[in-house]
Image (cartoon, rainbow, N blue to C red):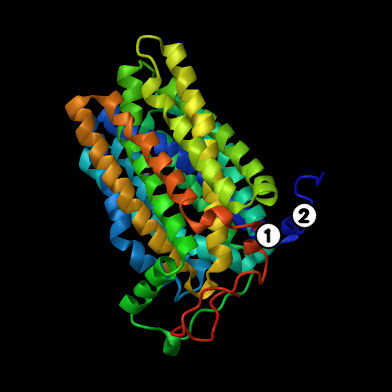
Amino acid sequence: MQRPFSSPLWRNAAFVRVWVAASISIFGSFITRLALPFVAILLLNAGPIEVAVLRSLDLIAALSVGLVAGAWVDRLRRRPVLIWTDVARALLLLSIPAAFIADMLTLWQVFAVSALTAMLTAFFDAADTAYLPSIVAPGELVEANSALTASASTAEVTAFGISGFLIQLLTAPIAIAIDAASFIVSAVLLGGIRHAERRVPVGDRQPMLTEIREGAAIVSNDPVLRALLLTQMSQAVMWGVFGAVYLIYAFEELGLGPAAIGVVTGAGGAGSLLGALVVGPSIRRFGIGPTAICAMLAAAAGNALIPLAPAGAPLLAAAFLVGQQVIGDGGVTAYDVTEQSVRQATIDNRLLGRASSTFRVASVSAQLAGTIAAGLLAEAVGLRAAAILGPLGALAGAIILVASPVRTVRIGALDAGAVPPYLPDTVGDQPVGG
């Protein structure tokens, strides 16, 4: 059995810095994920519609720049994009505690910060996904993505639990300041990477709209990538429902306070960690397709526990929600590592930013639809009924995979040279990655 951190991947200094930076910034982001909605709920009296609007604005903002972000980062060195979006997000988040201390905080500011941060995150994510294959060999992508996800899962276990107590002890706006600090630390670590990158010369660039279309064509013309995209969209509907109703449902209907909700959601980190640890061996043993299908079925089964949680029995309800976090998050994590590794291994690095943004925009669109539908349904027929939409989305994703060529894809698809990279004739010869 291989010892942890003993593989050649961990002798790659650039990857280690990326891994540490991601671990720290993700820790802070999990705090904000819980704290920002509670700013609206506890301090600004937001209800289901306002929380749905908050989440929808976040998604709309990411959607508005998603395709441009992918094409734009394919023209540039990815590391500077990562650094400056970290710095900008830190400054935006710091405006929340600053306004709170000055007694000037409004719901409109919360909306604006959430939206602008989401725009910057769209650029960060496009650059981040495209940067990894330029510093990691194709055969190491599953291990690299699993390591990044495992550290994120560990951060989730601690951050969600801590954030609930921070919100109660220090207030939600002050808790958000910790996330701002984590982005600054991430920027400093990324700034220390000395791995050389090259960008596409100006003469090799196509018009922005042409490059965006190339990203969409990469996905739509490949049956495996197309099926993975549709599954990602189905999963995104589930997350849209989750984001719209979960906090208010747990708080108002199940009687759980912020600290209890933080502990419960922290359990999702354990599930995600489990998913990150088993996905590599599962892919090697059973193949990419069966692993992805089982992962989506686990996501559906886990999220079915949310509407089944009993009201009037907080401890039992919390147990149901913990089960959802462990089973559902484990399945989602296993699927995400599988899907992202396939995408990074089979799409040429020169086009990976715009192709990945096609995934992101489609996913965000589906998540937005799920968020709006769940918010309206919650107002009309109740939070519990709206929560039923979530597991149905994940189940639809599993069905899509079963009916597609993904079910037969094996581990060889991720080995260097096993699958020729998708590369249109319109792209120049100069690589982006170093």
- Frontmost residue, 394 versus 409: 409
Residue position for label 2: 7
- Residue displayed at 52% across by 69% down: 347
Amino acid at dot 2: Ser
Residue position for label 1: 140
Q: Is residue 67 visible?
A: yes
Q: Nearer the viewer, mark 2 or mark 1?
A: 1
Amino acid at dot 1: Glu
In the rendered image, the quadrant that contains the N terminus is: top right
- Residue displayed at 20% across by 35% down: 376
In the rendered image, the quadrant that contains the C terminus is: bottom right
Extreme-bottom residue of the structure: 203
Q: Position of residue 159 (x, y in %)?
A: 52, 34
Q: Is residue 162 visible?
A: no
Q: For residue 11, which numbered disc appears in the image?
A: none
Mark 1 lies on a secondary structure that is helix
Callout 2 crowding tier (Cα within 10 Å): few <14, some 14–19, many ≥20: few
